[in-house]
Image (cartoon, grey):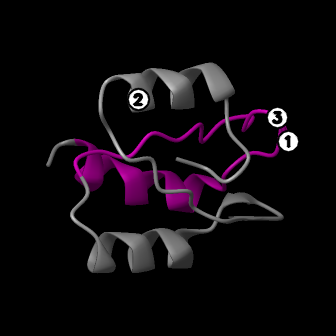
Amino acid sequence: MEESCYLPAKAAFEASGFKVLKCQLDEQGLNITHLRHILSNNDVAGVFVTPHHQYPTTVCLPMQDWGMSWPISIL
């Protein structure tokens, strides 16, 4: 989940027993390098991101990085 995130979603994941790991943001939204680091160093069950108009910053993840999240979502 993004470092600056939609708190009700974070609370829902935690209430369901998930440990939420926060991924850094950069000027374009989700920091893909940091996401890869998290994925390679943790047992991750899922990734929750807002690639279009990230809440609360409203920045948009560049289109070329959107594809990064699709393979993860089907694991």
Q: Quadrant of residue 37?
A: bottom left
Q: Which residues are magenta?
A: 45-73
SS class, disc 3: loop
User: Label 1, on which residue?
Assistant: 57
The kind of residue on which mark 1 rests is Thr
Residue 44 in the figure: left or right of residue 34: left
Q: Quadrant of residue 51?
A: top right
- Marks 3 and 1 in Cβ contact (< 8 Å): yes
Of residues 16 and 36, the one nearer the viewer is 16
The kind of residue on which mark 3 rests is Pro
Residue 71 in the figure: left or right of residue 49: left
- Marks 3 and 2 in Cβ contact (< 8 Å): no
In primary-sequence order, the first of circles 3 and 2 is: 2
User: Label 3, on which residue?
Assistant: 56
- Residue 64: x percent and y percent? 54, 61
Give the spatial CA distance, label 3 vs label 1: 4 Å
- Marks 2 and 1 in Cβ contact (< 8 Å): no
Give the spatial CA distance, label 2 vs label 1: 21 Å
Nearer mark to the viewer, of 3 and 2 = 2
Mark drawn on residue 13: 2
Nearer mark to the viewer, of 2 and 1 = 2
SS class, disc 1: loop
The kind of residue on which mark 2 rests is Phe
SS class, disc 2: helix
Q: Residue at x 46, y 20 (%)?
A: 12
